[in-house]
Image (cartoon, helix red, strand yellow):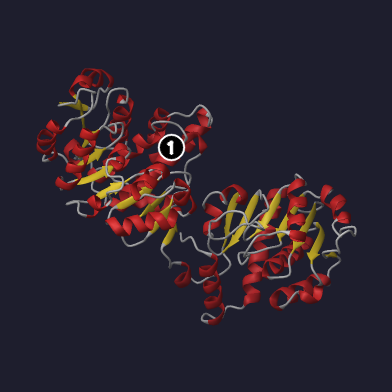
Amino acid sequence: MKLVTAQEMREIDRRTIEDFGIAGLDLMEKAGGSVAQAATEMLGKSSGKKVAIFAGKGNNGGDGFVAARHLAGRGTKISLYLLGRKEEVKGDARINLEKLSQLPTEIITVKQCPKGDESDLEPAKGDIAQSDLIIDAILGTGTKGRVDGFLAEVIKLLNAAAKPIVSVDIPSGLDADGRGPLGVCIKAARTVTMGLPKQGLVLYPGAEFAGELTIADIGIPKELSGKGKVNLLTADDIRPILPQRRGDSHKGDYGHVLVLAGSTGLTGAAALTSLGALRSGAGLVTLGIAESLNPIMEVKLTEVMTKPLPETKDGTLSLKAEEGILRLVKKIDTLAIGPGLSTSEETSELVRRLITRVEKQMVIDADGINAISGNISILKNAPGPRIITPHPGEMARLIGRSKEEVQNDRIGISQEVAEETAATVVLKGARTIISDSESNVYVNPTGNPGMASGGMGDVLTGMIASFLGQGLGEIESAQVGVYLHGLAADIAREKKGELALIATDILDSLSEAIS
């Protein structure tokens, strides 16, 4: 499913009307009807309930007028507060306001009063307190600049009412393109967005304000809704590309993953990466580990093979391990490198050499990424496919920017790095971003705050490497790995809660997520 910017949605609306001959009034009717349906679902039944609707002067308000008419027809008591003068409402919105005026529905005009005068909002406070639901149809996706003054007062009033709010298309005051609140913003319990989801509703911090997201089909032609570079992953995308097993298959059919991970004090990362690969279906997994750590890993990991490798005096992989690793690589399908390796200079040099010498497909995470910080051209010149899985701090170090810059433009920066390096980029975090070298972007909706815990990324690295070894391409492996990783966390949250969630809970829930 495509994720759109405000400008992209405006162009889709324009072409729907001009090129496909679908009337704007028809689009508005379906939009308002979808809002009314969502409100009815939240109310349990709409008859006899009271709904306060706050509507602006534009098309967002027009959707609110339609919703008011539909709800009134279902026996709902409606109070509609128009934030402006009736004569300022134009076009399709004006037609729907006139239709609503013909019903016995209370329409109250609320305008900004001169400073010092009693606000027109005062009479609304009691009405809001008696309402079962509020519909926010004030500002749409075209909002630019900071929301302040009178409209900011309205938004604060509605948020303070402690009533469930349904927002039309986007919570008023939220930037549609993902930059978060424009000053103050409606905190919706549910947002009914029209046609296609807007990036600002899915990406954080906007997702915190959108509540439950409903995507309303208002009749946008498929020819228009299927374009664009940014996509929202869904179960329907993942299900067809999950690896399937033949009845006569054996372990050699499902890939051999070599994991290079762990160091003194960080053996857990090696274990989690290896188990992440196994739990995701890898036929064979071998862990390459500093030789002094091998005995404990042989005890800890039953199904994973281990290979002791030469180490530094600090218990990290040394340069002397390089030739042995290159011999191992000839027998495997995928290499996962980085979790818990340490930032020892000798180990980092080993990582850099392997990135430039290994022709097999490779997933690079954690200290594997730290080893090439400031030297991103290594990826560009790599002899085989590469997937990098940085968290925002690692990405910032990799490209020499601040973490804030990365977080403020997660889509743009992931696209930029993927284009520059020809690697597949998995920028982790709330709403993990996956980008390929052609600027295609996939936003993952699964996962929860319980994943803010050590070891989660190690499991993901193993999962992605496993799917690569099973024959999926780089972008498909990243999509399946990231989606299932978050879904397993969501399943685990239902059993353990968020505060208690740990990385092994993801491993334990993977089979259920795959099912």
Amino acid carrying mark 1 in the image: Ala
Q: Residue at x 87, y 58 (%)?
A: 119
- Is residue 113 at all visible to an observer of this figure? yes
Q: Nearer the viewer, residue 89 or 64?
A: 89
Q: Residues within 10 Å of mark 1 (few under 14, many from 20)?
A: many
Image coordinates for residue 438, horizontal then vertical, percent: 32, 62
Image coordinates for residue 303, horizontal then vertical, percent: 24, 26
> The C terminus is located in which quarter?
top left
Q: Is residue 277 above or below residue 482?
A: above
Q: Is residue 380 left or right of residue 58?
A: left
Q: Is residue 115 above or below residue 255?
A: below
Q: Secondary structure at mark 1?
A: helix
Residue hosting label 1: 488
- Is residue 436 at all visible to an observer of this figure? no
Image coordinates for residue 341, horizontal then vertical, percent: 27, 32
Q: Is residue 147 above or below residue 387?
A: below
Image coordinates for residue 253, horizontal then vertical, percent: 18, 41
Q: Residue at x 42, y 45 (%)?
A: 392
